[in-house]
């Protein structure tokens, strides 16, 4: 009698163990199977990013994320736009001949923008991928406490990691570690300053 009970109990325990193992395999495979489908976050990283730049005041900057990288959107003042070409002799590549940028930006000259009032560029230093800071005030330290950018500083960006400097078009100055101008992503801009980063043309509206 005991042997019959023991056999029955053994079969029950074996079945339970196998069943639990099967359930464990099923649940452990769920994350693996789910990884075959792109997540909403992964989709978002490659999707265009829209910015209403009309809300920026002249001299204001906003940073957005596109494809996992920070992007600057700067609304330049009229005075800063007028002064952009005045310091080309201090730059490594004033004509942006070796810059990463769309072809239509190459044709825009020193402004490096589809609309001179708005500058869009990757906020990643070309030396060691640090995040440059805005230092927009000319001839002084701007917003950077303790950093003297010199009396001839025209306003632009300063990288706090190793001291690289860029002007308000993202063009790098000579005698700094960074070798190239800040890259410019593809983007479209409407007449009312609606910017779409990640595309070259705006979608037509009915």
Image (spheres, rainbow, N blue to C red):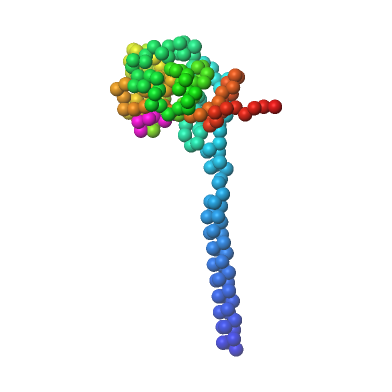
From what the image shows, is residue 111 above or below residue 185? above
Q: Quadrant of residue 18?
A: bottom right
Between 11 and 78, the one lying in front of the other is: 78
Residue 57 picture quarter: top right
* Secondary structure mainly formed by the magenta segment: loop
At 56% from the left and 49% from the top, the residue drawn is 37
Above or below, 188 relative to 84? below
Front residue of 5/24: it is: 24
The x and y percentages for residue 73 are 50, 24
In the image, residue 73 sits, relative to residue 25, either above or below, namely above
Front one among 26 and 202 = 202
| Residue 151 point in image, percent of width and height | 34, 12
Which residue lies at the image location 34% right of the left edge and 25% below the top edge? Answer: 164
Asked whether the viewer can see residue 74, the reply is no
What residue range appears in magenta?
A: 123-128
Number of callouts: 0
Q: Residue furthest left?
A: 175
Q: Tell which of 202 and 37 is nearer to you.
A: 202
Residue for point 43% across, 17% down: 110
Residue 188 included in the magenta stretch of the image: no
Q: Farthest right residue? A: 206
Whether residue 206 is visible, yes or no, is yes
Rendered location of residue 171, percent (x, y)? 39, 22
Quadrant occupied by the C terminus = top right
């Amino acid at each position: 009698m005991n042997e019959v009970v023991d056999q029955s109990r053994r079969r029950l325990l074996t079945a339970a163990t196998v069943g639990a193992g099967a359930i464990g395999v099923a649940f452990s495979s769920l994350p693996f199977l789910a990884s075959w489908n792109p997540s909403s976050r992964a989709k978002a990283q490659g999707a265009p990013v829209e910015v209403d730049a009309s809300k920026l005041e002249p001299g204001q900057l906003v940073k957005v994320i596109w494809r996992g990288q920070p992007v600057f959107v700067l609304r330049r003042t009229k005075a800063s736009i007028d002064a952009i070409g005045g310091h080309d002799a201090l730059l490594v590549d004033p004509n942006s001949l070796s810059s990463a940028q769309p072809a239509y930006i190459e044709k825009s000259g020193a402004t490096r923008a589809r609309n001179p009032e708005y500058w869009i560029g990757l906020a990643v230093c070309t030396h060691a991928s640090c995040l440059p800071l805005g230092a927009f005030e000319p001839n002084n330290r701007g917003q950077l406490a303790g950093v003297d950018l010199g009396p001839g500083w025209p306003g632009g960006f300063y990288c706090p990691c190793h001291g690289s400097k860029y002007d308000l078009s993202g063009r790098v100055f000579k005698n700094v570690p960074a070798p190239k101008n800040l890259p410019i992503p593809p983007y479209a801009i409407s007449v009312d300053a609606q910017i779409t980063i990640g595309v070259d043309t705006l979608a037509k509206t009915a």
